[in-house]
């Protein structure tokens, strides 16, 4: 028995992904469509007569005459996946628009002798919402008008009925896809005609039904949600809540992951059969286990982010949010769909870049990916805390204002970068020269299925781990090797670090760091921060011989601050001054010092050139601005 390929096609918010989850039980995986950065979700179910059915959930489309990258990918999937059957998912509350896709599929899969199509099945979702309005849809007449089998997905046994219809209506052999001959406008007119024929509204009590129906409720809610004044305030509150949950809920889980892998590493080294001085033990402990922890520590944030995004999308709010911020973001070359990834970037750029998949326009998606590293992620907080503590001491109020200034500065940097890159992209044709547009169908509000939300978020999180994990793990091992060899037998960690390949590189590059107000020690800290920005603090502690006198984290930071104040440059002058410390803050605010972000940028953009250009450009700009700031302050007599 052979495997049957079935494609699921439908508009965004049509219930397509929810139906996919029900058909497959979410026994699914994500696969990358060749030649693109778009994921197709693939699931299966078994059938004793037909063999396994392989179901592909394609990106949501408004038309099969493609105008966006996602629509082009869906059409390419229709042409290359050799489907035995196609399921057109149609929202019953939006018949006049979404039936057009079913009509296009009928035309694309019509056999050469013009007989009725048997390879396309229409899955009608949200029928219960129509019935709650007091309306009805004649499914038999709809099937006749379309010339396709129509299956309602609501009610008991609906999923099994749809599975059976797919298996029965499949083409014996995969059909050759034909391009639609009619225009999208013609299909929309035909869809409107069919909708008027098959939909009936009772005259009696129609007004009472309309006053309490789902569409009436949605209109009432939208009066506030889409209000010119209250809408943006509500949007800010919702997005702030999402961001807070990403940071607040994930923090204890991230600490648990961190402590778990630390315990694993320490536990390994404390085993009686393990020689703690052996190279293999240190490789496993400091390289592999620590590297795996660096991958998995982001997972709680990613999972919470995806839970929030899936919930907002299924509830119908995410489409409204995109329309609210579309106009202000258009002024800097982005769009409404870019805001959620940008906001998420303040927690972590890794899940934020993955959230950028929701941006339809390739140009906007690439611009969003490009400026995301400028958002001040949580990994910068330990560095900011250390440097602000050096500048302001115990004055929490001044340090708080300084931290706020750093966050505002990162936003301004993102706005400037987006504006400049957008203009350059438009002039030179980068990322595609097409003008972006926002076309959204506002669905009815509904309560998402929480179990499906959690499962869908888990599927997307699993995709992150599989995609970025190996890259980050390899890079972490390389950094461990660079800070360990060649004198790996040296017991003194400071000496070993100074004599390592990374330490020697830092000393060779010392002339590069001196204009920033530093020397090889701060340079090595900046180099090690590429593994993770917060590593800068621990590197400084090792270099300056800081030991933890008790179990208090504050004592460790206090000791490090003392050593920083006493540290001297080769000239005998203080190494850390107001000018050099402000320069370090500016550098960390702009520089791209995160291998995880680089790895995800490479994956999500699908371009090594994009990722390398982003890495080099941000670090070069950060360096130039830092040197200009430090030298400018020194010129003014501020050291």
Image: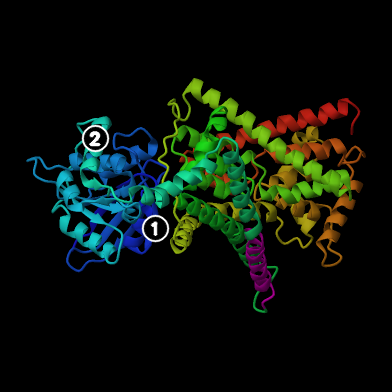
The reply, left or right, for residue 567 in relation to residue 262 is right
The answer to whether residue 214 is magenta is no
Spatial CA distance of label 1 from label 2 is: 34 Å
Q: Which residues are magenta?
A: 250-271
In x, y percent, where is residue 533? 69, 48
SS at mark 1 in the image: strand
Label 2 neighbour load within 10 Å: few <14, some 14-19, many 20+: many
Label 1 vs label 2, nearer the camera: 2
**What residue is rendered at 26% in x and 52% in y?**
136
In x, y percent, where is residue 312? 50, 51
Pick the residue in front: 166 or 134: 134
Q: Is residue 239 above or below residue 490?
A: above
Q: Is residue 294 above or below residue 201?
A: below
Task: Determine which of the numbered discs, if any, sits on residue 29 in the image.
Answer: 1
The reply, left or right, for residue 575 in relation to residue 100 is right
Q: Is residue 483 visible?
A: yes
Task: Determine which of the numbered discs, if any, sits on residue 536 in the image.
Answer: none
Task: Determine which of the numbered discs, if any, sits on residue 187 in the image.
Answer: 2
The number of numbered discs placed on residues in the rendered structure image is 2
């Amino acid at each position: 028995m052979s495997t049957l390929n079935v494609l699921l096609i439908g508009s965004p918010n049509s219930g397509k992904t929810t139906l996919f989850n029900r058909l497959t039980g979410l026994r699914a995986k994500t696969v990358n469509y060749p030649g693109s950065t778009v994921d197709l979700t693939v699931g299966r179910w078994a059938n004793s007569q037909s063999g396994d059915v392989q179901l592909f959930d394609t990106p949501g489309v408004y038309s099969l005459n493609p105008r966006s990258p996602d629509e082009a990918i869906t059409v390419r999937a229709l042409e290359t996946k050799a489907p035995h059957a196609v399921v057109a998912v149609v929202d019953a509350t939006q018949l006049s628009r979404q039936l057009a896709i079913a009509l296009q599929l009928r035309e694309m899969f019509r056999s050469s002798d013009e007989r009725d199509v048997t390879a396309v099945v229409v899955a009608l979702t949200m029928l219960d919402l129509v019935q709650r309005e007091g309306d009805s849809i004649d499914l038999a007449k709809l099937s006749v008008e379309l010339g396709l089998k129509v299956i309602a997905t609501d009610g008991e046994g609906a999923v099994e009925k749809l599975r059976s219809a797919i298996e029965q209506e499949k083409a014996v052999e995969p059909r050759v896809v034909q391009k639609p001959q009619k225009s999208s406008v013609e299909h929309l007119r035909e869809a409107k005609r069919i909708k008027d024929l098959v939909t009936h509204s009772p005259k009696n009590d129609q007004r009472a039904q309309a006053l309490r129906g789902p569409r009436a409720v949605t209109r009432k809610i939208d009066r506030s949600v889409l209000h010119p004044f209250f809408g943006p305030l509500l949007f800010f509150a919702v997005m702030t809540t999402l961001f807070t949950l990403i940071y607040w809920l994930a923090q204890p889980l991230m600490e648990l992951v961190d402590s778990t892998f630390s315990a694993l590493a320490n536990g390994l080294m404390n085993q009686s059969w393990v020689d703690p001085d052996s190279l293999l033990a240190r490789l496993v402990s400091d390289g592999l286990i620590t590297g795996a922890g660096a991958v998995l520590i982001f997972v709680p944030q990613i999972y919470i982010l995806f839970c929030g995004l899936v919930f907002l999308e299924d509830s119908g709010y995410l489409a409204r949010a995109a329309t609210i911020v579309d106009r202000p973001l258009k002024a800097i070359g982005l769009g409404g769909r870019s805001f959620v990834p940008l906001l998420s970037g303040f927690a972590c750029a890794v899940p934020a870049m993955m959230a950028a998949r929701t941006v339809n326009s390739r140009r906007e998606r690439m611009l969003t990916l490009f400026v995301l590293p400028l958002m001040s992620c949580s990994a910068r907080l330990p560095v900011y805390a250390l440097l602000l503590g050096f500048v302001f001491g115990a004055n929490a109020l001044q340090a708080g204002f300084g931290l706020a200034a750093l966050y505002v500065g990162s936003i301004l940097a993102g706005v400037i970068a987006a504006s400049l890159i957008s203009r350059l992209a438009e002039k030179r044709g980068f990322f595609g020269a097409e003008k972006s547009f926002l076309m959204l169908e506002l669905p009815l509000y509904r309560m998402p299925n929480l179990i499906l939300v959690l499962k869908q978020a888990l599927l997307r999180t699993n995709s992150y781990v599989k995609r970025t994990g190996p890259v980050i793990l390899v890079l972490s091992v390389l950094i461990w090797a660079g800070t360990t060899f060649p004198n790996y037998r040296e017991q003194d960690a400071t000496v070993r670090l100074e004599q390592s390949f990374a330490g020697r590189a830092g000393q060779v590059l010392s002339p590069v760091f001196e204009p920033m107000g530093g020397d090889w020690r701060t340079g090595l800290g900046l180099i090690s921060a590429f593994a993770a920005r917060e590593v800068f603090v621990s590197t400084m502690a090792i270099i300056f011989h800081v030991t933890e006198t008790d179990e208090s984290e504050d004592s460790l930071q206090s000791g490090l601050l003392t050593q920083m104040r006493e540290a001297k440059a080769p000239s005998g002058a203080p190494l850390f001054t107001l000018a050099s410390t402000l320069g370090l803050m500016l550098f960390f605010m702009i520089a791209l010092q995160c291998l995880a972000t680089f790895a995800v940028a490479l994956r999500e953009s699908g371009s090594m050139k994009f990722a390398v250009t982003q890495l080099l450009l941000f670090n070069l700009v950060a360096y130039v601005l830092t040197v200009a700031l430090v030298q400018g302050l020194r010129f003014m007599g501020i050291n």
